[in-house]
Amino acid sequence: MVLGKSSASFAPADPPAEAADAGTAAARPARRNRAPLPHRARNPELTRRQILRSAREEFSERGFDGARVDRIAARAGANKRLLYHYFGNKEALYGAVLAEAYREIREGERALSLDLYEPEEAMDRLVRFTFRHFLENPWFIRILTTENLHNARFLKTLTDIPSLHSPLVGQIRTLIERGAAKGVFRANADPVQLYISIAALGYFYVSNMQTLSVIFDKDLKSLPLIQEREAHAVDMVLSYLRRGA
């Protein structure tokens, strides 16, 4: 948080003189200058990020219909006027949260630098990253569930979404081609279908963790079972890609 100093100087008014005894005035206390009070410097980007983070929490907990703008503003330590200034309305704010959610996972995928690794290791890393992203960000699962309940109503309005996903599809296609050239991957794997399968292997486990734990009488939140599931997801993807290589 950036703090600045106010240019104003605050000092108390002189207190009235009080007689110590008849005809004698008490000495006035010396004037003391107080240090100027600090004020919070304006930081539009920080405020915007705080509002987005608070909106993410509200929408993931209550869905779009149950979320309230006043609660989002209160969580962010802002006021509704600022919220409307930055985002316009509740619908636009939800759209911004949704877009940011996709940008985060795409940025994480780009940071993997998969082109630096051999095809099998690169695919291993992508599967593990996807699984862990869902696991570490359960709010993302809830936001996607909300958007699917609304038939992707808001996602359809986000013009930059296709540009976010095209590089991912291209990267997976390149991995498949590199693997096929080395004789370790099948050449006819569809990159979109493959990514849907990768995402599903992690998404379903996290989104249904509570019910599956009851059904199978296992604590799927335990670290050993999470590690087992992650290894299973990697094995399924690589086994599919190796088949017929």
Image (cartoon, helix red, strand yellow):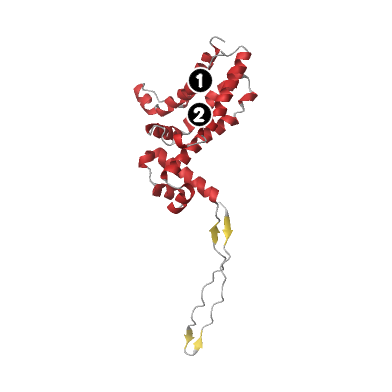
- Up/down of 142 relative to 123, above or below: below
Residue type of the residue flagged with mark 1: Leu
- Within 10 Å of the Cα at label 1, are there few (<14), some (14-19), or many (20+) other Cα atoms? some
> Residue 31 location in percent, x, y?
56, 75
Which of the two marks, 2 or 1, is nearer to us in this view? 1
Residue 92 figure quarter:
top left
Q: How many marks?
A: 2
Mark 2 falls on what kind of element?
A: helix
Residue 90 in sight = yes
Could you say which is closer to the camera, residue 56 or residue 29? 56
Residue type of the residue flagged with mark 2: Arg
2 and 1 marks in contact (CB < 8 Å):
no
Could you say which is closer to the camera, residue 158 or residue 79? 158
Instruction: Quote the CA–CA distance across marks 2 and 1.
Output: 18 Å
> Where is the C terminus found, in terms of image quarters?
top right
Which label sits on residue 132? Answer: 2
Could you say which is closer to the camera, residue 188 or residue 241? 188
> Residue 41 location in percent, x, y?
56, 56
Which label sits on residue 11? Answer: none
Residue 120 in sight = no
- Which residue appears farthest toward the top when viewing the image? 244
Residue, disc 1 = 194
- Up/down of 238 relative to 55, above or below: above
> Residue 227 location in percent, x, y?
49, 23
Could you say which is closer to the camera, residue 143 or residue 173? 173
Tell me what residue is drawn at x 56 percent, y 33 percent.
107
Say whether residue 66 is left or right of residue 195. Answer: left
Mark 1 falls on what kind of element?
A: helix
